[in-house]
Image (tube, grey):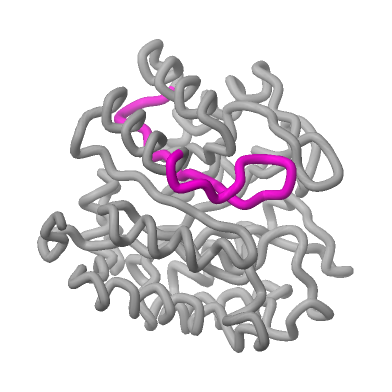
């Protein structure tokens, strides 16, 4: 087995998402204040990236830049040094409204470079919108996280990197377990890793996310394979088959336990920023 003791693991916490509600799990943070508090607990538990969506007054997903601004400000104040990653996902708006928060210049933002099926609809990412979002990220100094729901998305990210639409080496996250998209398949997962290393270099950092019951599976595969891990209530509201997760922090601690199992250190925010090539904040 590869020695993982010198390879710190970045843990990303996806705090809210667009779908989970208080009815699904009372711990899902909906308001900006709840999101800041929940993220602070997850930060103290070991998470160094906060993947963020915002909700409107009715708890529905939105891309409202003002709400993102308040959340970003609160996270920078209460979680100094934590990497703030804002979502440009399709459930929060249509067309260019999905990137309306990019002028806030967060550390990172999600970027889906192709379309795929979701449980009840098509997740549409047309080429012109992808190009616009990528250009906005370049303009505002935002590092994209490529959310790969399919092998073709990794190959498209490589093409965009070659022709300059993505600056620096892409950070790719494999998303597995979405109904009607890519299931949690170990051979596919291993081929994703092979493809990233072939296209971007053997030392390229990558991440993985599993949906629902597949969250712990993908955490295990990623941590034991030298990648980075995403957890949080956006993707999964349960701590096990019989119990709801009491908090985002509880899911983060479950991932840190896996790091301990494999003898792998949990990355500090300083290490996470160095691994991803992000600047250090002046106020942290």
Seen from this angle, which residue lies furthest top? 163
Q: Is residue 112 left or right of residue 28?
A: left
Q: Quadrant for the C terminus, please.
A: bottom left
Choose top left, top right, bottom left or bottom right for residue 99: top right
In this rendering, the answer to whether 210 lies above or below 130 is below
Instruction: Say if residue 105 shows up in the picture.
Output: no
Residue at 61% x, 25% y is 130
Q: Magenta stretch: residue 172 in it?
A: yes
Residue at 34% x, 32% y is 196
Viewer-closest of 82 and 174: 174
Instruction: Say if residue 160 shows up in the picture.
Output: yes
Choose top left, top right, bottom left or bottom right for residue 236: bottom right
Choose top left, top right, bottom left or bottom right for residue 283: bottom left
Q: Which residues are magenta?
A: 166-187
Residue at 45% x, 47% y is 186
Q: x, y (%) of residue 246?
A: 60, 88
Residue at 67% x, 76% y is 29
In this rendering, the answer to whether 215 lies above or below 128 is below
Q: Is residue 177 left or right of residue 91?
A: left
Q: How many marks?
A: 0
Q: Is residue 115 left or right of residue 37?
A: right
Q: x, y (%) of residue 11?
A: 38, 64
Q: x, y (%) of residue 78?
A: 44, 78
In this rendering, the answer to whether 145 lies above or below 74 is above
Q: Is residue 147 left or right of residue 119?
A: left
Q: Quadrant for the N terminus, please.
A: bottom left
In this rendering, the answer to whether 135 lies above or below 42 is above
């Amino acid at each position: 087995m590869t020695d993982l003791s010198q390879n710190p693991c970045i843990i990303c916490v996806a705090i809210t998402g667009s779908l989970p509600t208080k009815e699904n799990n009372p711990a899902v943070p909906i308001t900006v204040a709840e999101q800041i508090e929940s993220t602070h607990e997850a930060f103290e538990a070991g998470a160094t990236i906060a993947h963020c969506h915002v909700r409107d007054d009715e708890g529905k997903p939105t891309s409202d830049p003002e709400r993102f601004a308040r959340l970003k400000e609160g996270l920078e104040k209460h979680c100094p040094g934590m990497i703030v990653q804002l979502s440009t996902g399709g459930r929060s708006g249509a067309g260019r409204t999905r990137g309306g928060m990019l002028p806030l210049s967060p550390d990172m933002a999600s970027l889906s470079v192709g379309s795929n099926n979701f449980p009840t609809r098509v997740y549409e990412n047309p080429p012109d919108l992808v190009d616009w979002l990528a250009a906005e990220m370049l303009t505002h100094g935002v590092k994209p996280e490529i959310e790969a729901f399919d092998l073709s998305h990794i190959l498209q990210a490589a093409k965009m990197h070659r022709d300059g639409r993505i600056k620096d080496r892409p950070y790719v996250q494999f998303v597995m377990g979405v109904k009607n998209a890519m299931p949690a398949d170990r051979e596919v997962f291993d081929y994703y890793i092979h493809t990233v290393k072939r296209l971007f270099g053997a030392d390229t950092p990558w991440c993985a996310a599993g949906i629902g019951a597949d969250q712990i599976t993908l955490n295990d595969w990623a941590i034991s394979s030298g990648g980075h891990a995403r957890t949080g209530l956006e993707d999964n509201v349960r701590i096990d088959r019989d119990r709801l997760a009491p908090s985002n922090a509880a899911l983060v601690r479950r991932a840190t336990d896996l790091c301990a199992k494999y003898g792998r250190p949990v990355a500090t925010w300083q290490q996470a920023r160095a691994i991803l090539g992000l600047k250090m904040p002046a106020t942290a």
